[in-house]
Amino acid sequence: MTTVTIQEARARVTVGSFSQMPDAAAAAPPSGEAAEVALEFLTEMSPDLRGAAILGSGGEVLAGTGEEPERWGEDAAALFAVADEAEGVPVEQVHIATEQGEVFAVRNAGLAAVTVTDRFALASLMLFDMRSTLRQLASPNFGPPGGTKSRKGEG
Amino acid sequence: MPPKPHRVLLERVSVYADEAAAFMRRRRVARRPFARLYYPHGRSADHAQDSRSGAELFVAAGRLIEVAGKKQKG
């Protein structure tokens, strides 16, 4: 029954969930190539990361890891739809910790990022990295923030 | 005879390391699954796994975990 509910929610609000982004007025949508660079940077920054995707304002997948990157789009839309329906207010960030891993989703600057990490990933760092990646990606002079320094091996 | 200064330092560092390890161990044992939503102006809300919205969030998260697959080695 829950699956049916989610599929209904997905069909109803897939487009709506992305148009409700707090600052959906990004100047120009970033290219897929720029999104790939941003995703690569995010992956390098986060040693706990298993997979991630960056989505455009319409919910389209700009960049995604794995063999089926397009699947990120519909599943992220479903997550945002359910999260927005929980209190009837568009969410900014989502953090769900399960036994199998952790899911983070962030909306920022008219874009969205979704990541899946191992258990016990540092949530504040993960969310900060995702937000700053999206902010950088949305800016007209996009370049990976702070060079290519990695958190791997720290603390 | 007082202990050598470097031994005092080493002892102190290993005490801190033990404390940190114990904290992480307790965190692993005690931590339960949760779903937390963050709204504008810093507000956040937890949704219990047995609530309707919580259950839906966990199902949606499970699909994303499935999409991400296993972590690539190296």
Image (cartoon, rainbow, N blue to C red):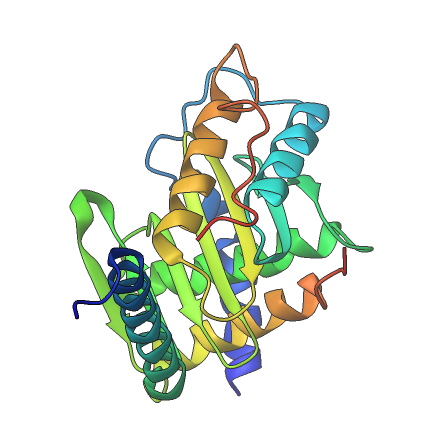
Q: Residue furthest front?
A: B1
Q: Quadrant of residue B55?
A: bottom left
Q: What's the residue at 17%, 44% (across, down)?
A: B41
> Percent x, y for residue A53?
62, 46
Q: Is residue A59 left or right of residue A84?
A: right
Q: What's the residue at 49%, 33% (across, down)?
A: A133
Q: What's the residue at 57%, 47% (across, down)?
A: A152
Compared to A43, does B8 lie above or below? below
> Percent x, y for residue A66?
77, 54
Front-most of A151 and A3?
A151
Q: Residue furthest top?
A: A141
Question: How many numbered discs?
Answer: 0
Compared to B34, does A66 lie above or below? above
> Percent x, y for residue A36?
69, 32
Q: Is residue A34 left or right of residue A134?
A: right
Compared to B1, does A36 lie above or below? above
Q: Is residue A5 left or right of residue B53?
A: right
Task: Tell me the quadrant of the picture where the C terminus of chain B can be found.
Answer: bottom right
Front-most of A39 and A87?
A39
> Percent x, y for residue A110?
44, 31
Q: Residue furthest right?
A: A67
Task: Tell me the quadrant of the picture where the N terminus of chain B can be found.
Answer: bottom left
